């Protein structure tokens, strides 16, 4: 089990929710979230994926306090620079690379696709299902080549690469199958009495 950006988002949402219930002003609550993020990182360990997602959440919170917009790709790049300044050897750490490449794939591909999908009339469940599918596929598109290179570097190309490709294909089949079932179910004509 790996700590990811989703966990950081949950921690941030819970902290902001608590501050809202206590009627703490927005600026103070957003700055206070930084302490929650720091504490969470200290508890789970300052691994590159945790630090990356915490830095991105912190930049978002700070940008809201200053009423400035920060782009996801900009915050990802700033997080990479900060991590590499303090730990330059992270550039060869697989956790660092997978975290950044999957986030980059999500930022580059899933957001534009979900924006296009939200233009038309689509139900909430269909939107959630399609966004989930595109997020997974976007992350997969950017991490699969990295994993392939990692297996080549270890000299186990044929078997591990074949197993990886088979696993990826099986995951894509499952995601697409579930997506089609949900979309088919949601777009069936309803019989009215």
Image: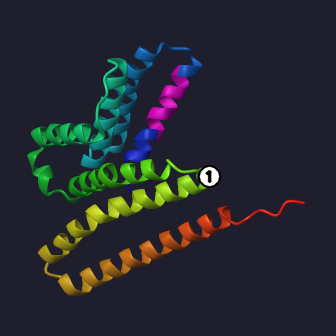
Position above or below: 44 against 122: above
Position above or below: 30 against 141: above
Viewer-closest of 74 and 189: 189
- The secondary structure type at the circle numbered 1 is loop
x 33%, y 55%: residue: 109
Position above or below: 156 against 49: below
Viewer-closest of 184 and 25: 184
| Left or right placement of residue 124 versus residue 170 in this view | right
Viewer-closest of 48 and 146: 146
Within 10 angstroms of label 1, few (less than 14), some, or many (20 or more) residues? few
Task: Find residue 179 and report its horizontal and vertical position in percent.
Answer: 54, 66
Task: Find residue 83 and report its horizontal and vertical position in percent.
Answer: 17, 41
| Left or right placement of residue 116 versus residue 75 in this view | right
Is-magenta flag for residue 18? Answer: yes
x 54%, y 53%: residue: 128
In the rendered image, is residue 3 in sight? no
Most extreme residue toward the right is 193
Image label count: 1
The chief SS type of the magenta part is helix
Q: Which residue is mark 1?
A: 123
Task: Find residue 60 and report its horizontal and vertical position in percent.
Answer: 34, 30
Q: Quadrant of the N terminus?
A: bottom left
Q: Quadrant of residue 45?
A: top left
x 34%, y 53%: residue: 106
Q: Quadrant of residue 139?
A: bottom left
| Left or right placement of residue 122 versus residue 1 in this view | right
In the rendered image, is residue 158 in sight? yes
x 54%, y 25%: residue: 18
| Left or right placement of residue 120 versus residue 41 in this view | right
Viewer-closest of 57 and 178: 178
Range covered by the magenta-colored residues? 10-19
Is-magenta flag for residue 179? Answer: no
């Amino acid at each position: 089990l790996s700590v990811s950006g989703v966990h950081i988002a949950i921690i941030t949402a819970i902290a902001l929710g608590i501050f809202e219930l206590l009627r703490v002003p927005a600026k103070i609550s957003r700055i206070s979230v930084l302490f929650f993020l720091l504490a969470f990182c200290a508890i789970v360990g300052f691994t590159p994926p945790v630090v990356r997602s915490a830095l991105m959440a912190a930049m978002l919170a700070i940008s809201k306090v200053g009423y400035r917009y920060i782009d996801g790709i900009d915050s990802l790049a700033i997080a990479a620079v900060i991590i590499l300044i303090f730990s330059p050897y992270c550039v060869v750490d697989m956790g660092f690379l997978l975290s950044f490449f999957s986030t980059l794939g999500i930022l580059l591909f899933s957001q534009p696709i979900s924006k296009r999908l939200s233009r038309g009339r689509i139900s909430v469940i269909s939107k959630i299902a399609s966004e989930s599918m595109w997020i997974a596929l976007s992350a997969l598109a950017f991490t699969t080549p990295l994993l392939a290179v990692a297996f080549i570097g270890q000299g186990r190309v044929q078997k591990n690469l074949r197993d990886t490709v088979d696993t990826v294909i099986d995951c894509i089949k499952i995601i697409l199958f579930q997506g089609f079932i949900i979309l088919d179910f949601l777009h069936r004509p309803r019989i009215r009495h």
